[in-house]
Image (spheres, rainbow, N blue to C red):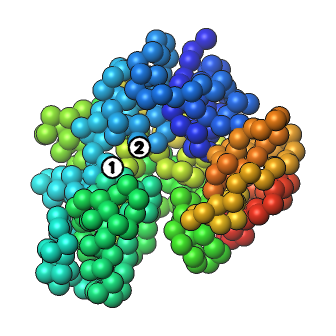
Amino acid sequence: MRKVHILGSGGREHAIGWAFRRCGFEVHYYPGNAGTAKDGVNHSYDGLETVKRIEEGLVIPGSERYLVDGVANVSEMVFGPKAEVARLEGSKVFAKEFMKRHGIRTARFEVVHSPEELPDKLRSFSPPYVLKADGLAGGKGVLILKDVNEAIEKGSKLISGELLKGVKGPLVIDEFLKGEELSAMALINGSDFVLLPFVRDYKKLRDGDGGPNTGGMGSWGPVEVPAKTVEAIEELVHRTLWALDREGYTYRGFLYLGLMLVDGEPFILEYNVRLGDPETEVVVLLDPEGFVDNILKAFEGSKMGEFNPRGYAVDVVLASEGYPDSPRKGQEITMPEEGLYFFAGVSQVNGKLVVSGGRVIHSMGAGKTKDEARKNAYLNAEKVEFPGKYYRRDIAL
């Protein structure tokens, strides 16, 4: 029996394991959640020692944290870049300076190391001011501010560690780019790549893109992208791989480009060294066999094939009241046996499912058309009950 070991506990990780199980793999999650136990075996995770003890199979880190911590440095079975390369996501300063060195299209920027430098460097930018924490900040490390005094105040607190718990150090000031955001995810086999189907996700909490940023309230795909834009995105990936090779690095794993299309021209806002969430849930539903087959080929360093999405897929995230700042937890969840769901913030207590995180369940829908997939996702969403359940009503509209 072929084995896959998935590091993480969210919906993205559940979806990856679901696809591998459909393809006949024995699936193991570290640590997983109450829902992943339906598609595999959950194990405790105690850091790099856990990965060192895995003797057989493929290891897939879900979150960037594992890669930044160096899981790929301690085991050849890990599908993902080593810690030195994971700095593309782990350090905004490293990523921006890497792009500048190699002429990779990105926004103009300045690096600020101390609060004293901040006012002068801000003066070379126009509002709105984009401030980015250097290190991992759980999706909360980007500030977009219209007032220069507020930018100085919050930027200084970001550097000193007063603004976000556990986040301090240098920051990046990025020029604000006006355009259309797009995410592009690729599978890299060391020297070549294949783009995954394009997916649109919804970061804001409320309908109509209102409220605070979240980890993602839903997604749908495949999204049609003009051929000229696809060519430009492919060129950015090629350029990135060429630059990594010049610096002596090999990349094997997932690469996620956060893009801004300015007059149709893509600029890289950020790199991620793992798959997106909730984009992954949609990608695996569109073509689970192609997803698994291409990961295996990329891991082996062989030529990958094109993805063949079957129809459309929609993901509606069911969140808990108070998300993203202070989600309510502990409520009992009731839901049907049938229907397709990927679990995230769900635990099991005394044999019952209970809410244990902000994003609780990903309600999935598939169909020949986007409207059919959307309808199925919302029908499934209505069948899940827990006090404080909240979800957007405009995903895939």
Looking at the rendered structure, the secondary structure element under dot 2 is: helix
Q: 332 or 234, which is in the foreground?
A: 332
Specify whether residue 314 is in view.
no
Q: Position of residue 25 (x, y in %)?
A: 62, 20
- Which quadrant of the figure has residue 319? bottom right
**Distance CA(mark 2)–CA(mark 1):** 7 Å
Residue at x-position 63% and y-position 56%? 358
The residue drawn where x is 70% and y is 44% is 346
The residue labelled by disc 1 is 89
Location of residue 280 in the rendering, given as x and y in whole percent from the top left corner: 55, 46
Which residue is pictured at 84% across the width and 55% down the height?
385
Q: Position of residue 127 (x, y in %)?
A: 30, 85
Q: Amino acid at mark 1?
A: Glu
Q: Nearer the viewer, residue 153 or 50?
A: 153
Residue 64 - label: 2
**Mark earlier in primary sequence (2, 1):** 2
Q: Is residue 24 left or right of residue 275?
A: right
Q: Secondary structure at mark 1?
A: helix
Left or right: where 239 falls relative to 30 = left
In the foreground, 100 or 29: 29
Residue 207 seen in render: yes
Is the Cβ of the residue at disc 2 closer than 8 Å to that at disc 1? Answer: yes
Q: Left or right? Give the position of 282 relative to 242.
A: right
The reply, left or right, for residue 124 in relation to residue 142 is: left
Disc 2: CA contacts within 10 A as few (<14), some (14-19) or many (>=20): many
Q: Amino acid at mark 2?
A: Glu
Q: Residues within 10 Å of mark 1 (few under 14, many from 20)?
A: many
**Above or below 389: residue 79:** above
Which quadrant is the N terminus positioned in?
top right
Q: Quadrant of residue 258?
A: bottom left
